[in-house]
Structure formats: structure tokens, C-alpha cells
Amino acid sequence: MKSVLLIGLNNFGVLLTKKLHELGHEVMAVDMNEERVNAVLPMVTDAQIGDGTNEAFLKSLGVNNFDMCVVAITGNFQNSLETTSLLKELGAKFVISLADRDVQSKFLLRNGADEVINPEKQMAEWAAIRYASDHLLDYVKLDEEHGIYEVPVPEEWGGKTVGQIDIRKKYGINIMAVKNDGKMNLSISPDTVLDAGNTLLVLGDIRSMQRCFKI
């Protein structure tokens, strides 16, 4: 369980708060809008109405006691930048900030952010790969070339073992798990038999995936 200070209750901030709550983490939420703060009260450990650009206010929260701080301010990049910088100056352990554009990411990283999230850009990249590819069910980007892909087992592989298809040797692709009716099997060996109705979680680069699974 982690303690999280989340500043900015826009749509992204609320969705993040909800998921962190579901995962059992402690969240303190901060926003200047009282209505937004009241809306998340059932999902947070604590909530404050306040301004993230106010140094005295941030200091009163004890930002150095949180495992991570998330700056989810949108619509006012100056406020986001100031809040990010102040959090780091006050001893925040790990600061994640939201950005709308690449140039904003650069400024945030130079001024205290340990990591930057650009939700629209990341979702656009995901959607381009997911929906422009046949036989691809899901995708998680790891770097510019590699990712984890969820793909259906090709019909011609049905009844064969992982060792028989040997995609690691042929394509450099690693099978991480086999999913059957929503249940995940992580104990994969060369003797694991694949069924045509299963899906695979595989790790590799996009070009190898396209050649192997014709996505």
C-alpha cells in the first residue's frame, strides 16, 4: 500500500483516485474547487481545498511523507509547473506530472518532475496500434520498439506445444502467459499445449509481432 498526494481533480485525477482507492492505496486529494473535493471524499483518506502553488499550504501537507505526488492540473500549465517545482523543493520523494504536449513534458522534467504522463498522446499511440492491427486484442508499450501484446492463438497452432511452435527462436518473441476463459496461466513451459480458443500474452518488438501474428 502506498500513500499518494494527488493535486488536481480533473477527469484524469478523479479516475486515478478511483483506481488507487480500488487497489487499496491511501490518497490525499487536493483541488481548489470544493465541489470536486467533496465528490471524491468516499474514495480518499483525506481531502483538502487548496492551491498547489501556495508553498505554505503544500508544506502543511507534509509532502515528504507521501510515497508519491501526482500533479494532475490541467488548463493552467504555469500552475502545474509551479506546483511540480515546489513539491520537489519541499522534499517530495517522487513527483509525477501531467502534460498536454511534448514541450510541457520537457519543462516539467527540468523543474522537478521525476516522470511525466501525457494521457492523450499515450492513448493515441495505443489506439493506432490496437485498431490498425488485425488479431490484436490489447497492447502495453514498454519502449519505442517493444511491448506486451495480447493476441489470439492462431488456428494452425491449436493442439501444438510451445516448444513445437518455438517462436522465441524464430522471431525472438517470448510467451509470458496463456489465457483461457479469462483465467491466466503463467506457468509456461515447452510442453504447454495451446488451444485455438486461447489468447497469448507475448513480449517482443512490433515488427516481429507483425511477421509472426500478421497483425
Image: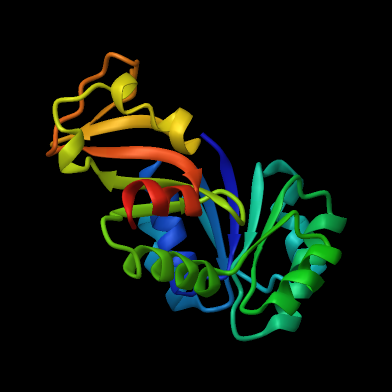
Q: Quadrant of residue 110?
A: bottom right
Q: From the viewer's perspective, tell me whether residue 90 is left or right of residue 103.
A: right
Q: Where is residue 77 in the image (x, y as percent from the top left)?
A: 70, 82
Colouring convention used in this rendered image of the protein:
rainbow
**Residue 21 can be seen in this image:** no
Q: From the viewer's perspective, tell me whether residue 110 is left or right of residue 200.
A: right
Q: In which quarter of the image is residue 60?
A: bottom right
Number of numbered tags placed on the structure image: 0
Q: From the viewer's perspective, tell me whether residue 196 is left or right of residue 100.
A: left
Residue in the foreground of this view, choosing between 55 and 8:
8
Q: Name the quadrant of the C terminus.
A: bottom left
Q: Where is residue 127 in the image (x, y as percent from the top left)?
A: 39, 69
Q: Position of residue 37 (x, y in %)?
A: 47, 69
**Residue 210 can be seen in this image:** yes
Residue at horizontal 83 percent and vertical 49 percent from the top: 91
Residue at horizontal 30 percent and vertical 55 percent from the top: 136
Residue at horizontal 20 percent and vertical 25 percent from the top: 160
Residue in the foreground of this view, choosing between 101 and 113:
101
Residue at horizontal 40 percent and vertical 51 percent from the top: 211
Above/below status of 202 relative to 96: above
Above/below status of 181 relative to 61: above
Q: Position of residue 54 (x, y in %)?
A: 77, 72
Residue in the foreground of this view, choosing between 60 and 69:
69
Q: From the viewer's perspective, tell me whether residue 87 is left or right of residue 17.
A: right
